[in-house]
Image: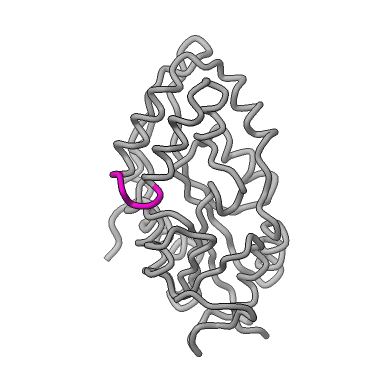
Amino acid sequence: MTALSQYFPTIEGMIDEPLQAPNESAPTLARPGILVMDVDSTLIDQEVIDELGVAAGVGEQIAAVTARAMAGELEFCQALRERVKLLAGLPVSVFDEVYHRVTFTNGALDLIDTLHQHGWTVGVVSGGFHEVVDRLVEDAHIDHALANQLEVVDGRLTGNVLGEIVCKTTKLHALQAWARMDGMPVDQTVAVGDGANDIPMIQAAQLGIAFCAKPKVQLAADVAINERDLRHVLDLLSGD
């Protein structure tokens, strides 16, 4: 598998309703831009690894580690490896089961469609897994995607992650690389996430949004949305 670094080389406030742009320099729908968001608990309502844990009979154990990692209490990469080990022996058919169980967050598809109508591109970066993320990307017509991949031998998970793990730095570099690839200026970048590993990309974007996020993420973001409706992101972008 190709190293993630080859794809993404290093590149030099809570509010209440109604939502409003946090400052005059907020990205605008009048010009093309790019929005990059997390997948688990942002694009979708669930955490995929937690759903895999349920299938493996270790759901509570994995969910507890997930919560601590997303709150910034545990180092994400090590926490992911520990959780993935607990999935060893699961058949690859589990990915189909989980894909059919997860649901897009309210307003997610409307947000993506509206951005596309205004010439924007959309990317997702996930500490989850390509085996599920790729199908969500196809369903939602998302332009860019990056996620982890699980090792499979003889039709069963080995409990290992292939290649480099998608971490907070990888997410940041993905935002930067995709913006450059699509020709989008920095002042037309938006990042949306809920976990501690989303903080660097949230802080690097012109508009960083904490979506139903952990307290540490809300403090780091420009603005917080605390209702599970991604259409509210559009309220934060200046109009035509």
Left or right of residue 87, residue 101 in this image: right
Q: Residue at x 52, y 17 (%)?
A: 90
146 is higher (above) or lower (below) than 210: above
Image quarter in which the N terminus is found: top left
Image quarter in which the C terminus is found: bottom right
In the image as oriented, which residue stretches furthest toward the bottom?
24
123 is higher (above) or lower (below) than 62: below
Q: Residue at x 27, y 66 (%)?
A: 12
Q: What colour scheme was applied to this rendering of the protein?
A: one colour
Residue 86, position as x, y percentages in the image: 41, 22
The one of 93 and 10 positioned closer to us in this rendering: 93
The one of 21 and 153 positioned closer to us in this rendering: 21
How many numbered callouts?
A: 0
Say which quarter of the image contains residue 238: bottom right
Residue 129, position as x, y percentages in the image: 50, 36
Left or right of residue 198, residue 73 in this image: left
Which contiguous range is marked in magenta?
A: 70-75
The one of 138 and 192 positioned closer to us in this rendering: 192
Left or right of residue 144, residue 98 in this image: right
Say which quarter of the image contains residue 69: top left
Residue 96 among those drawn in magenta: no
Q: Main secondary structure of the magenta part?
A: loop
Residue 133, position as x, y percentages in the image: 57, 40
In the image as oriented, which residue stretches furthest toward the top?
154
Q: Residue at x 53, y 13 (%)?
A: 155
